[in-house]
Image (tube, grey):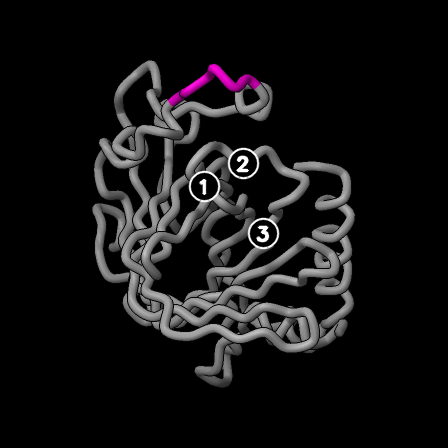
Amino acid sequence: MNVRMVIVVGFIASAVCLVPSVWAQQSQFSMDYWGFTHEESGVLSGLGFIPLIEPPLVVDLENYQYTWVIEDAVLDSSRVDGGIEYYYYSGGTFKVYEDTVEPWNAVYSDADCQDPEWVGSISEPWTFQDGELFLLAEFQYLNRTYYTDYQFGDYEGMMDLTGGTHLDDIPPLLRHGWTFGGATDQPWACIPEDYEYRWDGQLFLVEDPTRTESTTWSGIKSFYR
């Protein structure tokens, strides 16, 4: 992650820490991920890596590789308002795969990306989904925002966990209303050919023990806008 993106994301993290009314709620954190997305004929897709997965999901990060794939998120509408682009998607899935094959065949680095002759597995999407389907989530919605003046963006989605070999790690009452949010970094990141954005975010659930209302990524951002 480049310095400018670290500053922006660091500011977001700092701001979140200043909102006790939100984070005093019970938090179920699932995973940290990064990767790349692109849109073709109004359909958003993407793939990437998951370097951190926390309980209650049971993982072995030392011996297995965990990757993610977004498929079939359809662009319903878009608009531009005051230099900000808004994109609204429906449908689509977020799939997490556990690869038991060594050496791991899904590989990428920024150094490789700088080499115009390097192809790597990022151009072979099958390498990100050739393991077991570890977790399946279906989007309730997915929104993306891009700030043209700053050449920076963010995204937020809400999803339900519906399948995968480790679905049972999550109690049934905690499988709905997960927030899928993060930052998009287009101009400063090295973007592989055929992709448009680098996404870096988290999948998490924040529940108030006395209510069933969950806190969204946009709700958190509203506190420091």
In the rendered image, which quarter is residue 106 located in?
Answer: top left
Q: Give the range drawn in magenta.
A: 115-120
**In the visual, does 221 lie left or right of 175?**
right
Q: Are marks 2 and 1 in contact (CB under 8 Å)?
A: yes
Residue drawn at the location 59% of the way across and 72% of the way down: 218
Q: Name the residue under label 1.
A: 195
The x and y percentages for residue 173 are: 32, 71
- In the drawing, what numbered circle is on residue 129? none
Mark 3 secondary-structure assignment: strand
Q: Mark 3 points at which residue?
A: 184
The x and y percentages for residue 47 are: 39, 42
110 up-or-down from 171: above or below: above
187 up-or-down from 127: above or below: below
The x and y percentages for residue 172 are: 28, 67
Q: What residue type is labelled 3?
A: Thr
In the rendered image, which quarter is residue 66 located in?
Answer: top left
Q: Are marks 2 and 3 in contact (CB under 8 Å)?
A: no
Q: Does the stretch in magenta take in 117?
A: yes
Name the magenta segment's main secondary structure. Answer: loop
Residue drawn at the location 53% of the way across and 78% of the way down: 208
Quadrant of image for the N terminus:
top right
- Answer few, some or many: residues within 10 Å of disc 1's Cα (few below 14, many 20 plus, some between 14 and 19): some
Quadrant of image for the C terminus:
bottom right
The x and y percentages for residue 164 are: 22, 50
Q: Mark 2 points at which residue?
A: 191
Q: How far apart are marks 1 and 3 (CA)?
A: 12 Å
